[in-house]
Image (cartoon, coloured by chain):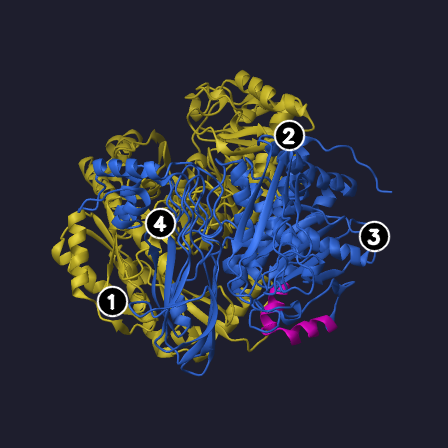
Amino acid sequence: MRIGIDIGGTFTDLVAIDRDGGVRTVKTPSTPQDYAIGIARGLHDLLGAEVTAIDELLHATTIGSNTILEHKIAKTALITTLGFRDVLEIRDLRMPRLYDINWTKPEPLVPRHLRFEVAERMRPDGSVSIALDDASVAAAIDALEAHGVQSVAICLLHSYANPAHEVAVAQAVRARLATIAISLSHEILPEIKEYPRTSTTVVNAAIQPVVRAYLHSLRTRLDEIGVAAPVRLMQSNGGLASARHAGDYPAQIVESGPAAGVVGAAVLATRLGEAQVITFDMGGTTAKAGLVEHGQVMRAEAMEVGGGVMAGARLLVGGGYMLKLPAIDLAEVGAGGGSICRIDPGGAPKVGPQSAGADPGPVCYGRGGTQPTITDCNVALGYLDPAGLAGGSLRLDRDAAWACIDEHLARPMRLSVPEAARGMLTIAAATMMRAIRSVSVERGRDIRSCAMMAFGGNGPLFAASIARELGIARVIIPPMPGLFSAFGLLLADTEHHVSRSFRTRVDTASVSALERLVREMRDTGAGRLAADGFASARQRMQFTAMARYVGQSSEIPVPLGDLSAAAMLHALPDAFGAAHAKTYGFRAPPGELVEMTSLALLARGLADTPRLPDSMTPPPGAEESVRDVWYPGTGWVATPVICRAGLQKTPRAGPLIIGEYDATCLVPPGSTARRCDFGTIVLALTQE
Amino acid sequence: MQELSADPDPITAELFRNAIVALGDEMALTIYRAAYSGVLKNIMDYSTAICDARGRLVAQGLSLPGHLASIPQALQACLRHFGDDIAPGDILIMNDPYEGGMHLPDIFIFRPFFAEGENRALAWATTVCHHTDVGGRVPGSNASDSTEIFAEGLRIPPLKFHDAGVPNATLIRIIERNVRLPARVMGDLRAQLAACEIAVRGLEDLQRRHGPALLRRLLDETMDHSERLTRHCLSLLADGEATFTDWIDDDQIDAGVPIKLVCTVRKSGDRMVFDWTGSSPQVKGAINNTWSYTAGASYCAAKCVLAINMANNDGVFRAIEVIAPPGTITNALPPAACAARGLTGFRAADCAFGALAQLYPQLVFAASDGGNTGITIGGIDANRAPFIYVDFLSGAWGGRPTRDGLDGNTNMFANMASFSIEVIEAENPLEVLDYEMVPDTGGPGLYRGGVSLRRTWRMLATEGILQVRSDRATHRPYGLQGGGPGAPSHNCLNPGANQQDLAAKLTMTLREGQVFRHDLPGAGGWGDPLARPLDAVAQDLLAGKVTPQGALRDYGVVVRADGTPDEAASLARRAAERRQRPPTPSPAWHPLDGRGV
């Protein structure tokens, strides 16, 4: 039996799948003081004495990002080259908001008095300009000791070209301070550009003691309850890694929850034969969109943690802490069930980005919320069952929602309550469409040929109307949409990403130098996979070069597969031209020089059994019932409400509502729904 | 006669606003992705927008503050020039500062959108990009010591870049022959065309959905909504009038002669006026503003005091008037040179903030670092290959009404990224010796101004030419409400015991082994420094942003041997100082040292 566990701020989701495809799920309150307690409780609730039968435990956690957001980091120091201790604080100077004199940079994770300098200097070619000064190293270590530092990041200039000085400093620190955690920049990100490398190394150092302590606590609790299975963690890049690796490189697991859902969607899409899928994950405060092509997730080269949601403005950076590590590329907007609806002083209706959150929550929760939210609009229109969410554990006050919408929205706009509520949902949908467009249309993809996979607590409710607006003909609702990240964990593979700076013009590149680099990277990737238990027959290597035309200022990735160094150099100019044409719509005339700046390796460990069972039977649900629901054009219509098990393979015409434990799916008039393989629901939309 | 349409309902209007603003952003993203030049990527020195048939701005993509007013000016100049002679397939181009442009490197591309069956443009897709080079005396076309626009590069009047779908081959050959990096300029122009294509496709979708008549109404309503919001925010502010004077050290031609900027803000009811009457006549050096750049600085300052950051469009302009007298440095007449007018834009923003600060002391920060310092080092490396290194440094915000100014952040009037030291060293025969904050340089205040950033370079090639455009060496960033000015900027050769101090603006030869150091100005402080809590001073001491000597001099804080404030001694010292300099917060300041008087 395998278990997927996704920890969120409020709930911990667990999904268990046994060898026959039997699936069990549970949602249990998270325990922020020690999340391992909630996990042990959830495992007990889900499996009882059967916990000993667990073979593998796959885990996504927000502990990395929460540690930073809540500033619960370890006491962390930085050792860097003389003259450059402010690189971390100066950052790249950019700000995410204009015209706001109160904007404040995130506090550096290492304060200035804990940033120590050592005298030394490497040149960009890796030669030593100034030898490492032992006295300055000793002084820095004295300071680490005096301040009681728990974790230290070591980042020296040009260490990507020659790490000798970083290694020497680390040895000196280790010799005197046996228990301090050490993060080395040339191990975490051996690439040129001092700010991204320093920032990434510092994030790693700042969260490492907290993440290690958590992983240790988790292991202890699991041992106590008789679970001997290994724990693997989801990384931001969509691959799984061993708990040991996650403890060494915690910066790689910072965005693990959202990644798991997209990976699950990618596997499911492949099995369903869908070539291009847009993932749409809508929860209580935000909605996220991603793109899956031919089973491959799209990755961004860098991300910011703690920067908040930047709606549709991916050019504005600087709001959070920079991590230059591959992460699944998601566009996020601040629209969710809790988003507040209001009329601005110019008379325009607006949705979000302010959210009522979980507390007080929407007006219909009856916990003191006074401003109408998206969930209130859904209740007023009959889309959500007033009898309750999460299997009836939370009743919704429809009258309160109605009155509030009437007062704050309908009357000011001179519209009826259903018209106003529906209007706000349409505006929210427009905001979410921007996220979807930014991962598809803005990358030159024809959205009409994509399918949409909708999950998250609110995804299945909005999916049909958004898809229709975008010209998408097919929507897939996966099993367990409200716990889909936990489910997605069960479908992921083990992956390691390795990258190195390698700056050279392709026509004059040294084959032997590239050969050495490829061999070293391959050894690193293979070593990490072997440590995770993958023999060489189950290892797959995939190289990608970052390249550009000489004279261009930014690079694009060029996939090179598993080629030899000589073959890479031979293939690169043409492969780059093709990638350039796909991204920008044109390529330079033949003969334009190409240069590469770095090489990345994706080392994947293949599982020995299929991750997705062939069939999954949805749990039985309530009997079919009927509820009045409002649609534009038709007004109130008595609409059948069924459970997923009540849906057949033959399409059933909307209007229809499919109610589940963790989500509600709306099948509007003019569309159909049917059960499909692997327990999915497929909606077919006719265009108006 | 155009068909009339009923008023759109509020939901439809909001959905349209969303769509049209998203379209402006999508254009901006297209340029970002497709552009060749680093100026566009790192500094994002470009703008995109949708305008209506009359050339009024409806929606602007993400943009530099300096571009806030430029696109409608330039498009309206083109519309005046071409009148009805605009047909499907036409694409217009221009860069002339004296026809609505800003400086020659900024090339505008405009493409009309026609509704089905109509023969007059319904709307315009518009872009402006700062190009790497447009010819003229110096690489980059950015010299601050040119004295006529004729020295600054290729000047393009309103012309058709494409005529009914056919590229203007004559013009393209002229451009290619007159710029230093034709492939990069043409590549960036292609990016502008791609952005216009995206916009036209988006407008076609909107037209199919709404029809031309309602589309026109929705464009109007988008501007009207911004106007209502702007007037609402303005009406929340007190009425009044205030004048402020700030200075540029000199224009490098008339060295040592300060240049005056005067801004009067008049706020009454739901409108605001920025009046630049009294500013210096236009100058010989290339730092003259066109109207639109002065307006950009005015709007930038205004947007910072308004409660809502509304979408930028013609509705905002209707409520905020900008008066810049022709023939002054705020609205130069031909043939004034203007390539390096960036400096004047920064100072105009400082000046407009200074005027607003007197009306709204709780909404405005003290002067920031005065804007970017431009550094260029060019020459021949060891392999006889030419190199050119261009860098822009900035980094300190003035003290704010509720908190300290930022240390190490882009100026509000720009949103520029810094260059990586490792990349500088990998690509140029230069060694960077430090990049760090300088203590005791932030203007003292209840809320301290941001500290100076320092960068130092050693020349590794045999020799090269160093050009520096900096300012605020004699006219320091002002403090507000009793706060002190920031430290002046400083340039020097071979720092140390025998260092040679240099002028703020210079062109000189840098030889192998020589070291050049630039200190940016520190930013001004806000409020009485003697009122700064000891805790805050203690934090600055711990961080090394204030030294014990600085704490005593600027804050009346006595520091113990362990580096922490001595509370009793400090309170006594402050009381004594207070008797000598009573805390009379005043927004006025003395032009020569920037200190509140």
Residue under disc 4 on the same chain as residue under disc 3 = no
In this view of the protein, which residue sits in the foreground, A435 or A476? A435
Pointer 3 residue: B119
Identify the residue under disc 4.
A235
Asked whether the beta carbons under mark 1 and mark 4 sit within 8 Å of each other, the answer is no
> Which residues lie in the magenta part?
B170-190
Marked residue nearer the N-terminal end (1 or 4)? 1
Q: In the shown orientation, is residue A90 left or right of residue B148?
A: left
Q: Is residue A34 left or right of residue A632?
A: left
Report the side of B274 relative to B211 (left or right). Answer: left
Whether discs 1 and 2 lie on one chain: the answer is: yes
- On screen, residue A60 versus residue B209, left or right, reads left
Query: Which numbered mark, 2 or 4, is in the foreground of this view?
Result: 2
Disc number for residue A326: none
Rendering coords of residue B460 (x, y %) = 37, 76
Which residue has dot 1 on it?
A120
Mark 1 or 2, closer to the camera: 1
Disc 3 marks which amino acid? Answer: Asn
- Disc number for residue A347: 2
Q: Which color has been applied to chain B in this rendered view?
A: blue
Which amino acid, by three-letter code, is at mark 2?
Gly
* Structural distance between the alpha carbons of marks 1 and 3: 69 Å
